[in-house]
Amino acid sequence: MLESLDLQTRKKLRDILDVTTNLVVVVFALVAIGVLVKSYFASKGVNTSVPISRGSAFPQIPGVDYNKSPRTLILALNVDCRYCTRSVPFYNSLAEARQENTKQFNIVAAFINNEEGLVKSYIEEKQLSVQAVSGVDLNKLGIQMTPTIILVDSNGKVLDSWRGELQPDGEREVFEAVGLPYKPRTGSTSTEVNIKKTVDIFDEQNAALSIRPHGKTQNDPAHFVEVFDVNSHGNVYLAYGTSMYKYDANGKLKDVRRLPADFTSPFCIDDAGNIFAAGARGLTIFSPELVKVRHISLDHLPEDAFTLKMALDRKRESVYIQTYTPNPLAQILYRFDLKSG
């Protein structure tokens, strides 16, 4: 009798759970349908983007008065847009022309970025002498890409527009549209003013030197971390796989040698081709032929320390070694005098 009652109780609980589950599914379905219907009718009834066409009225940008000049050039920009940065020299030419003809036209840079400080820093870094407005909803202005240039008259009527990074012919059109002779762009995107510095041998748009290792392809994405060096002659030494590759300053392969079994990275090269590598609690020096010449023990290094990076001071004949120890957690920079040891 007790066993039968227990079965009935379990059956009732199961039925209640089934009904509850079905109700939850129905409720979620109704909510989803409601959201879709609302979105559908909202998208039909509200148009947040106004297409840009000649003769159309361009929306007002907060803080910008079109009446102050016969014409206003609006630059739609994004600080993270590389084509905007590459166009900076052209914008600088426009800004210079505007300063020489203040009553002819005005320039406004409308940034999609909300951070006012970020926009201010960008303007100062690029040396743009224009009015800048941050946090502009470009979509509501009908602008779908950056950079975009819109020319409006004193009433805000669109006279013309240009999209993307302009070539010289396009730049000339913009100057003609504001009634001024073409002023070629000043500066270059590869100058210190117009790019954020990365490393000296690279431009943000183009690598100054590109080398594809001749060895067998490695699948490890971290394989190249701290495994190359360049001496003062411009020779590039690259440890790849089980070999050391030497390239000249133009990227031409000059030499390949097999790495010794006890060779460890990182390493650095002097002008004579001698190689200084981080060994176990020490510094190992190899000849240009990768024959071990000397091992210098660094007994003061902790046993669990390993080398993060090495650098050679050729003038002072010193090697700098940056180490990391997990316990206690620390990074230490050592300077080793090669003359005195």
Image: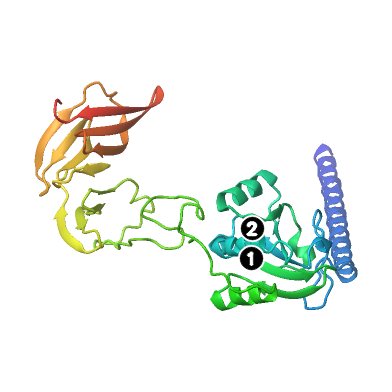
Q: Quadrant of the C terminus?
A: top left
In this rendering, does residue 121 appear at all?
Answer: yes
The residue lying toward the viewer, choosing from 11 and 221, is 221
Q: Is residue 84 above or below residue 227?
A: below
Residue 147 shows which numbered tag? 1
The residue lying toward the viewer, choosing from 242 and 85, is 85
For image coordinates 59% across by 56% down, the residue present is 80
| Residue 137 point in image, percent of width and height | 76, 58
For image coordinates 75% across by 56% down, the residue present is 136
Task: Look at label 1 and name its amino acid.
Answer: Pro
Q: Quadrant of the N terminus?
A: top right
| Residue marked by disc 2 | 78
| Residue 70 point in image, percent of width and height | 79, 68
Say what secondary structure mark 1 lies in. Answer: loop
Q: Residue 249: name its quadrant.
A: bottom left
Residue 70 shows which numbered tag? none
Is tag 1's residue or tag 2's residue first in the polypeptide sequence? 2
Q: Is residue 52 above or below residue 205?
A: below
Q: How many marks?
A: 2
| Residue 199 point in image, percent of width and height | 40, 50
Say what secondary structure mark 2 lies in. Answer: loop
Q: Residue 150: name its quadrant.
A: bottom right
Contact, mark 1 vs mark 2 (Cβ under 8 Å): yes
Q: Residue 285: name its quadrant.
A: top left
Q: In the image, is 71 to the left or to the right of 86?
A: right
For image coordinates 49% across by 60% down, the residue present is 189
In this rendering, does residue 145 appear at all?
Answer: no
The residue lying toward the viewer, choosing from 72 and 334, is 72
Q: Is residue 54 above or below residue 289?
A: below
- Distance from disc 1 to disc 2, alpha carbons, whole Å, reads 7 Å
Task: Look at label 2 and name its amino acid.
Answer: Asn
